[in-house]
Amino acid sequence: MTRILVTGGAGYIGSHTAKRLSRQGFEVAVFDNLSRGHRDFVRWGPLVEGDLHDTALVRETLRWFKPDAIIHFAAFAYVGESVSNPGLYYRNNAGGTLSLLEAMRRTETRNIIVSSTCATYGQPDRQPIGEDTPQRPINPYGASKLMMEQLCADFGVAYGIKTVALRYFNASGCDPDGEIGERHDPEPHLIPRILMAATGEISHIEVFGRDYPTPDGTCIRDYIHVNDLADAHIQAARYLMDGGASDCFNLGTGHGASVAEVIAAAEKVAGKPIPLKHGPRRDGDPAMLVADPSKAAQVLNWRAGNFDLQQTVATAWNWHRKELERARG
Ligand SMILES: NC(=O)c1ccc[n+]([C@@H]2O[C@H](COP(=O)([O-])OP(=O)(O)OC[C@H]3O[C@@H](n4cnc5c(N)ncnc54)[C@H](O)[C@@H]3O)[C@@H](O)[C@H]2O)c1
């Protein structure tokens, strides 16, 4: 059986990927320090509870599990936090990856798929965004992920470690079976926050800017369902294990949705109006970020599209209501 080690597999995207891997016949183990993940999200293989910075433990884990590939999600992922605490981000996202690569080079593990982000592109002047767009991050989160990509490239040259860097746009939605979902605290992502406004957990959703040069004036993003993302990782692992060379791919639907459209979709799903307030633009928020996912289609034979926006929001709503019931006992 093909073995995949999932770092950060107790988190949002990692747990969904572990489930998809297991459903497709892979053997999975999770490496996570549970700093931002959840023990109850680890259901499809054993959990090694540890920190990426513990190179000896990572090395031991690789010697024990002998993965054919690693899918590396473990990182911190909040732009705002990275601005106020940049050291945390460079240490965890770049330093953590360096420790993982050091452990890989001392074992036989040669394939790694890493979570990168459209934040490495900063404020691109062309849409949709292809992989050849210059990477000019405008915050420490994006910069730490670009460093991660660079570390992987350098370890490729020096030690033959092969990397696929997947640059995601906005991960969204939850497991359609409702077994796992998005549980972040605080929760910075738009769709869960809209749903929190729908249930009254927060008083309203704040819309930052309605004077952007977009059809309805609100920002446009590319919302990709987490299961579509998970499948791209599996395709990338197959690609590397079949002898594919190091490469990078943008993962998105190729279609943008505005904040107003996401709110409208959520109102339909929840069956009620969602209280909102309009605020000023936020610093560093580009009007539009939409992926050109055609390279992933050609090389990895992967396309998003199992879920449209409405379905994506519906899977998030389903999970959100379950979580609320759980919290209320
Ligand atoms: N959510 C998005 O929209 C999005 C978009 C682009 C890229 N990404 C990237 O995808 C990855 C996963 O994101 P997510 O939303 O699932 O985040 P998450 O916080 O839900 O999951 C990250 C997991 O990594 C673990 N972790 C963090 N640092 C660790 C360390 N040093 N050692 C061991 N475990 C550690 C956490 O405990 C958590 O379980 C991240 O690398 C993120 O940068 C996410």
Image (spheres, rainbow, N blue to C red):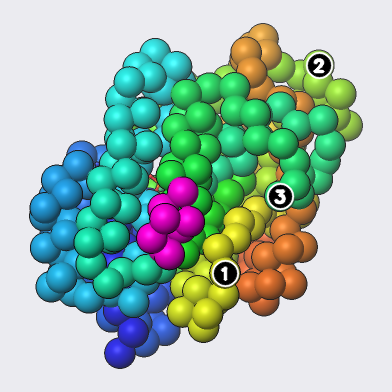
Residue 89 as seen in the image, left or right of residue 293: left
Q: Which residues are magenta?
A: 154-161
Q: Which residue is mark 2?
A: 211
Residue found at x 33% / y 84%: 2
Q: First in sequence, mark 3 or 2: give its number.
A: 3
In whole angstroms, how far apart are the C-alphas of marks 2 and 1? 44 Å
Residue type at the position of mark 3: Glu
Residue 124 x %, y %: 75, 32
Establish whether ligand 1 lies closer than 8 Å to the Cβ of label 3: no
Mark 2 surroundings within 10 Å by alpha-carbon count, few (fewer than 14), some (14 through 19), many (20 or more): some
Mark 1 residue element: loop
- Main SS of residues in magenta: helix
Q: Is residue 253 above or below residue 134?
A: below
Q: First in sequence, mark 2 or 1: give its number.
A: 2
Discs 3/2, front: 3
Residue type at the position of mark 2: Asp
Q: Which residue is mark 3?
A: 131
Q: Which residue is mark 1?
A: 245
Establish whether ligand 1 lies closer than 8 Å to the Cβ of label 1: no
Quadrant for residue 113, please give it.
Answer: bottom left
Residue found at x 67% / y 76%: 301
